[in-house]
């Protein structure tokens, strides 16, 4: 029978795993059988740089943590060797890195996972693995915001290249019609015609 100290240690591990499951946006379980030391080191480094927590776990302890975190649907996957990868922010990082490695190894395989507190099927994890990296997504969003600003900047640069605002306005100003050859002095207005004189009354 395990000692009280061992039981306390297990309780602490379960509590830590439970908080980790609850505090992450996504998690992936893998069977790491067959991975060598060099590949494991490289894989852990890549995951760590992507902000993903990765650790080997005991199935019995993780099973209790899944139950407490209301992810009991993962318990059916807890057989053989198990490693847990969780991410607190990036939805696709863990799935993308682990799926990429699984393609290179016939023994290393993804067993299950969850998304926002819900157990998901393997096809959902496959879709997560195909998401662009966080940096690419941020670049696309930033590009969308910068598009109007870039257009304005190009327009201003075109004005500068054309000699400034006044030069551009001069190019767009309508041409002034040429003056007539007539003398600038206004011609005198014609005198109105005299009204016809009234006929004198006939003499009686």
Image (cartoon, grey):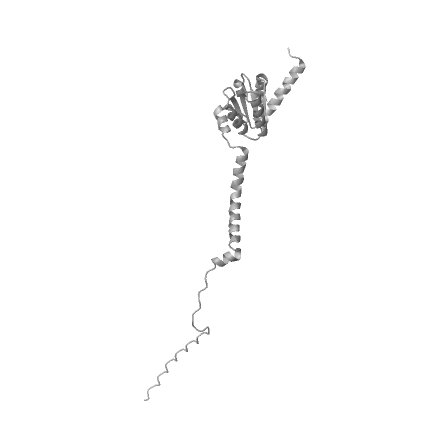
Looking at the image, residue 189 lies above or below residue 59: below
- Could you say where residue 197 lies in the image, as x and y percent from the top left? 37, 83
- Check the image and name the residue furthest to the front: 38
| Quadrant in which the N terminus is drawn | top right
Where is 115 relative to 144, above or below? above
Residue at (62%, 21%) from the top-left corner?
15
Q: On the rendered image, what quadrant is the C terminus found in?
A: bottom left
Q: Give residue 190's position: percent from left, percent from top.
A: 41, 77
Q: Can residue 157 be seen in the rendering of this structure?
A: yes
> At x 63% / y 18%, what residue is drawn?
11
Place residue 65 in its image quadrant.
Answer: top right
Quadrant of res 41:
top right
Residue 111 x %, y %: 51, 21
Q: How many marks?
A: 0
The outermost residue toward the top is 1
Residue 64 drawn at (x, y percent): 58, 18
Measured along the vertical axis of the image, is residue 193 above or below residue 18? below
The answer to whether one can see residue 21 in this image is no
Identify the residue at the far right of this view. Answer: 5
Q: In the image, what residue occupies the spot 53% across and 43% down?
A: 146
Q: Nearer the viewer, residue 88 or 149?
A: 149
């Amino acid at each position: 029978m395990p000692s009280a100290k061992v039981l306390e240690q297990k309780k602490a591990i379960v509590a830590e795993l439970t908080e980790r499951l609850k505090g992450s946006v996504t998690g992936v379980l893998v069977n790491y059988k067959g991975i060598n030391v060099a590949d494991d080191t490289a894989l852990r480094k890549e995951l760590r740089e992507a902000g993903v927590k990765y650790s080997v776990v005991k199935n019995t302890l993780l099973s209790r943590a899944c139950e407490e975190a209301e992810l009991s649907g993962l318990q059916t996957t807890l057989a053989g060797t198990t490693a847990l990868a969780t991410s607190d922010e990036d939805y696709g990082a863990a799935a993308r890195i682990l799926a990429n490695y699984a393609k290179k190894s016939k023994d290393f395989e993804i067993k299950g996972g969850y998304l926002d507190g819900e157990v998901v099927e393997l096809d959902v994890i496959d879709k997560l693995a195909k998401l662009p990296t966080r940096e690419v997504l941020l670049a696309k969003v930033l590009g969308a915001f910068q598009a109007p600003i870039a257009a304005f900047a190009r327009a201003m640069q075109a004005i500068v290249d054309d000699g400034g605002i006044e030069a551009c306005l001069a190019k767009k100003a309508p041409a002034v019609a040429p003056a007539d050859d007539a003398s600038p002095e206004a011609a005198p207005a014609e005198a109105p015609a005299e009204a016809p004189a009234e006929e004198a009354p006939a003499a009686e």
